[in-house]
Structures are given as C-alpha cells and as structure tokens.
Amino acid sequence: MSKLTPVLSANWDEKDSFTIEGYKRNGGYNAVAKALTMEPDAVIAMIKDSGLRGRGGAGFPTGSKWGFIPQGDNKEHYLVVNADESEPGTCKDMPLLLANPHVLIEGIIIGSYAIRANHAFIYLRGEVVHVFRRVQQAIEDAYKAGLLGKNIGGKGFDLELTLHAGAGAYICGEETALLDSLEGFRGQPRLRPPFPAIAGLYAKPTVVNNVESIASVPAIINNGVEWFQAMGTEKSKGFTLYSLSGHVNNPGQFEAPLGITLRELLELAGGVRTGHKLKFWTPGGSSTPMFTDEHLDIPLDYEGVSAAGSMLGTKALQIFDETTCVIRATLRWCEFYKHESCGKCTPCREGTWWLVQMLQDLEDGKGTEADLTKLLDLCDNIAGRSFCALADGAVAPIISSLKYFRDEYLEHQRNGGCPFDPVASTIFKTVGA
Amino acid sequence: MNFSLDQLKIMDSIIARYPRSRSAVMPLLHYVQALDGYVTPRGIEKISELLNISTAEVTAVSSFYTQYRTEPAGEYHVGVCINTLCAVMGGDEIYKSLEDHLGIKNHETTADGRVSIERIECNAACDYAPVVMVNWEFYDNQTPQSVKDLVDSARAGKPTAPTRGPKTLRTWKQNSEVLAGLSDGLANEGVSAGEASLLGLKIAKGGK
C-alpha cells in the first residue's frame, strides 16, 4: 500500500471531473448542504479543530484566520481566494482548478457563510486561459444550480462570486498586494497592521486563502475532524498535494498525508533520472532554502522542514541532479526576483539588481573568495528589511547554495568559468532532437 | 476611432461585476487588448473616462503588469519558460533555437504579424517541463524541434492544438477576451488532467 491519500485529486481521472454533473456524481455540494444547517461559528470551530493550515506557503491555521473576522460590525466582509500561483516550482492549484473547479466553489460557499461574507472573489493568475474558462464555467453552472446568488439552498444566505484575472505579476500572490491589485491599483504590498481581517479589500474585514486551503474544506465538513486529523503529523494535520518536478523519471502530483518524506515520494516518482544522482532540491518552491541528499528523510510537514532550516512552502519539490550548476540555478531564480520586485522597498528593488550582477560574475568565474562574503553581506541587508517576503525569497537560494555548495562557487573561480555543460542537464537526448 | 455601442455595453457589464468600479481596471485592460491587440491610447482614455480616474492612473496600472503590452502581440504569442527548472530541463535550448528559427528577439514579432516571442517566468506547470505557452495555453513537455514545428504550424494558419486546452488554438486577441471574463464556450474541451497530474492518483488506485 502506498501512503497516498487522494482526496482533492480523487476524481481527476474522470473525463467530466470539471463539470457540475461530474462533481455532484461524486458527492459534490453535499458539504454545502450540511454546512448551511450549522451555525456559522460552528463551521469556523470545526475548521479550527481540524487543524487545517494554509496550503499557500505560510501555514497559518485557516480556522483561526476565519475567526479573526469581527462579527456584528455591520460591515461587508469578503472572502478572497488567492489563485495567483506563481512561485517557481509550484504547480498544484492550476491542475486542481483545471480538473475540479467545483471543489473550490463549494469551499468558497462554506467559507463565506462562516465568516458572513456575501461577496467572494477568485484572483486567478492571468497566464492560464484554459483554467480561467473552467473556473468561469463552474461559477456559471453553480449560479444556475442555485448554489450561488440569492437565498442559497433556501437558507437565506446570499453570495456573489467574481472571477478576476491577474496580468502577470508574481507579487500579487502576496495577500496585501493581491488586494491592492483587486482594487484596481499596482500590486504592491501594504504595511501591516492593519491586517486584512480588519482592513482588507476596500478596507473591509477580509479573509485571503489559498486555493488548496479552501478546496480542503468540503472534505472536512463531509468526513469530520477526526477523519482529517487521522492523517498527517502532530501539528501538521491532513492531506496535501506534493508536486515533484525536474530530474525525476516520472514527475507529477502526489496527494499524501503531511509528513511524507522525499525518499518516499521519489520512489513513487520512479526515482531520480536514471543514471544520475540527487544534487539539490527545494521543499516548497524557490523561496524556500534548498536541501541536498542529506535531507531525504526529513518529514515534509511544517515543523520538520522548518527544523531543518527551510520551509514547507507550497510543497513544490524541484529536483536537480548532478548535471545542474547550482550557481546557474541560483542566478536564474535571482533574475526572477529582480524581475518581479514591485519596487516599493529599496533593499529589494536595488538589492536584487546587485545580487544578479554579483551572481553573473560568479557564474562566469570572475571574482575572489572575498566576493562570497560580500554576497552574503548583501543578502543580510536585503532579507527582513522590506514590507513583504519577496526579498527573503530572493536571498534564500543564495544563502542556502553557499551553505551547501561553497566549493562549487570557488571551483568556478579556479576554472575561470562554469565547469558544467548546460546541455547535459536537459531532458533531450541530443540537442535539437 | 470610437468604441462601438456593443463594446461599451460590454465595458459597463465588466464594471458591474465589482462593488467599486475601479476594480474593473484590469479586466477592462484585458478587454482593450482583445479589441486592439495591445493597450492603446484610446483604450486608456476610455477606461479613464469610465472609471473616473486619470489616464496616468490607468497607465500606472497597465505598465505594472507584464501581460499588458505597449505594442501589438503576434496573432500567436509564444512564451518559453526560462525560469530555473524549465531552463535547466531544456527551456534555454528551446528559446535559443526559437530565436534562431524565427530570426527575432525577445518581445519581437515576425514580419507577417503571426508570431511574437517572449521569455516567460514560471507558469505553474513544472511537472510538464519544459513548458511553452501560446496565447497562454499549455504546451507541455516541449523540445526545440516541437516548438519549431509549433510556430511553423501557427505561421501557416493551422496551429498545433494545446496539450491541455481547447481543441483549436484561439488567437491572442480572442484569448484576451476570455481573460476579460467573456466566455467563449470552450471550457468543456480538452482533458480533465494531463498524465503527470494523474500520476499519484494512478499509483494510489493501483495499490502499489
């Protein structure tokens, strides 16, 4: 028996899994019916008790986030779903929405009911047109079925749901930048406090949740807290999507209890590319410090990864074998952060430009060992000195690659250039094939 | 040239989706791109008028987001992922061979107006690397040769279909209209999920 626990992905192999008929055939929208018979506070309590934590990276308890919304304040409340999946390596929410958009909509109805919101939004990254079509169709069908709109299920609950396309800005995955973007501004993070629970969208109490977090709610309502808690580890409960990509024989999505290890996942993915060995990997996207083959048995839950010096992040496991130059990889990530820096904070806006220049020189074999110290000093002046975590993400691959592969940086200097053949890392048999 | 009454009605319907009108600036910009192929001065002026904000504010938003263009895209806009994972897996080779094949550089368009190219960042399909997007549709597991064939088919007016998307590739303007929230009725076309998305599920069902 494998450790896998397909819940969100359980019906993806059905041809019409993305339709309302396909979803209902598998018990879809039963959780809404059940939740609407509960008191909203009881729904919040149930999600709190389940131990569900945010699946978008930070791991904040979802039920607690809902509980922060002030009640009886005579203000509009909003639920905003962060579907701006853009963290390098992260590829779970897009296949989920392509194959099963209704599970998100069901979670949105329940979440909105719990926090007393009558308007919810899905902020979907703009570069995925077919995902947009699927979600849009699902919303339209949910309206037709009386699951959205006025007096849902005859229970007196009203909910409007608006789908909103982004336009290619990684920073809008940061929740306050997302809110600015949704309000029609440049997507730049806000100073906190106030937190979105007090002053979010249009300065009203707002919950921002990741797609996978909200999509996990219907299963908890249907199956109960104990069922959910039976999966996972002490402080990281439940199932989640792990995405394996890169130099593995069979990349893909694996839904498993929190706490599975890379060694176990690699076995399911057919191992590292045949004839090669693991060199480095990210546990949860490029913003999470990289690991090496020393870390194969770390439990991939919030605590386990954190204790080993990284973060669970989005569970985007990018695998690189020994043909990959770690400086090339780090430089390319750094170029990404430079491109995506919104420009609001000086350390990030200016710092990422300097980091790219230094890394380019190091990749070209220029500089001396003293430059590595300078590089780390630069990182120290960037991380933690900006409004949001983008700057922290930018330095994570640099600091961690220097920690584990310092000698490779020096080897570039001794060699007067990069000793790696970039063609060897490709998956093509020969160039041009 | 003015926008037609039908087009203005659509713009009003986009604004009506939001509790506050300014939130409509992004879908309106997508809609202008659907009509004009890029964010045109007349589009900026119209949005400014409709939302009662200055043209400078509309431009400030437009210039922040990479999907909004200051000049026309090709009918088929080809994005090659060059973020680390795709680059390492072959994205760099694909991009270079594409530039050589078309004789154009990043952000340029072929003389026939059919194909434009762009180096793009991670597009959330890493388990299908190397990834190429055409008009923001998924083309999975690409090679230098498959992308050359793809752009040749597009220039011949019969583009290869996306891997996970509609049966027929729509134009860049048509897909911009979808992003403005106007349905083209193609949601039911294409697969539920690709092979890589189903891998864990298959193993779980096989009981291995």
Image: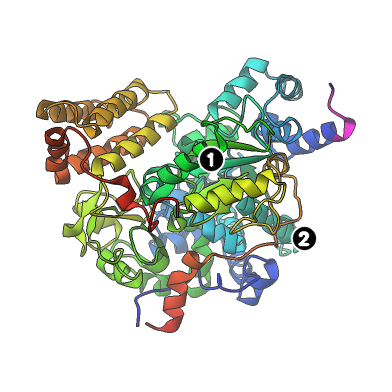
Q: Is residue B84 above or below residue B195?
A: above
How far across and how far down the image is residue A392, in percent?
30, 36
Of B32 and A54, the residue lying toward us: B32
Pointer 2 indicates a residue of which chain? A
| Circle 2 Cα neighbour tier, 10 Å, few/some/many (<14 / 14–19 / ≥20) | few
**In front of the other: label 2 or label 1?**
1
The answer to whether residue A85 is left or right of residue A239 is: right
Instruction: Write the residue at 65% across / 76% down.
Output: A25
Locate residue A39: give its quadrant: bottom right
- Camera sees residue A120: no
Secondary structure beneath disc 2? helix
How far across and how far down the image is residue B162, in percent?
62, 55
Q: Main secondary structure of the magenta part?
A: loop
Instruction: Write the residue at 43% across / 70% down.
Output: A225
| Quarter of the figure with the C terminus of chain B | bottom left
Q: Amino acid at mark 1?
A: His
Of A154 and B200, the residue lying toward us: B200
Secondary structure beneath disc 1? helix
- Camera sees residue A416: yes
Q: Is residue A47 magenta?
A: no
Residue that mark 1 sits on? B101
Residue that mark 2 sits on? A144
Image marks 2 and 1: residues in contact by CB distance under 8 Å: no
Q: Read off the magenta span.
A: B2-6
Q: Amino acid at mark 2?
A: Lys
Q: How has the structure been colored for display?
A: rainbow
| Quarter of the figure with the N terminus of chain B | top right
| Circle 1 Cα neighbour tier, 10 Å, few/some/many (<14 / 14–19 / ≥20) | some
